[in-house]
Image (tube, helix red, strand yellow):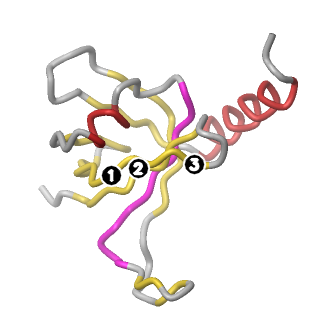
Amino acid sequence: MANIFDRIQKSAFKVVTNTFGYCASWQPSDGSKHETAQVLKKEPTKEYELAGIEYNPQIWLAEYHKPHFPGLYQASESGKHEEITINNELYYVRKVVPIWDGQSYRIIMQHIIQ
């Protein structure tokens, strides 16, 4: 049986993404099943230094929770060229990193101007 805090975390993330999230879709580069999910998205606003690290205004971030986008993290780690569509905007997936307790992932992406 899952820990009560894991269930609360999953429920809270679902409420937040359903309320503030964006519709996202991903067609894996290997041609496997098309995936969709609600994600949280953060657009860059301006360039600045944060904790000694230069912040790049060309980088967008999105977060999703397991079990959405199965295989995206692994594809990112293996260097595959992946793209994701969020709210009808196309983004190149630069990297996917597990965050918090590994149940959530952050997509570091770059907007593709069409």
Question: Looking at the rendered structure, which numbered label has been put on residue 99?
Answer: 3
Question: Residue type at mark 2?
Answer: Ile
Residue at 57% from the left image edge and 48% from the top image edge? 99
Task: Look at label 1 and name its amino acid.
Answer: Lys
| Number of numbered discs on residues | 3
Q: Residue at x 48, y 26 (%)?
A: 68
Quadrant position of residue 73: top left
Check if residue 35 falls in the magenta segment.
Answer: no
- The correct choice, above or below, for 54 with respect to 58 in the image is below
Return the x and y of residue 40 as percentages of the image width and height. 53, 48
Chain-order first, disc 2 or disc 1: 1
Q: Position of residue 45 (x, y in %)?
A: 44, 78
Q: Which residues are magenta?
A: 56-66
Magenta stretch, main secondary structure, is strand
Which residue in the structure is indicated by mark 2? 107
Instruction: Mark 2 and mark 1 in contact? Answer it, CB < 8 Å.
Output: yes
Residue 109 placement, left or right of 83: right
Indicate the position of residue 16 as horizontal and vertical percent values: 68, 42
Label 3 sits on what residue type?
Ile
Quarter the C terminus occupies: bottom left
Q: CA distance from mark 2 to mark 3?
A: 10 Å
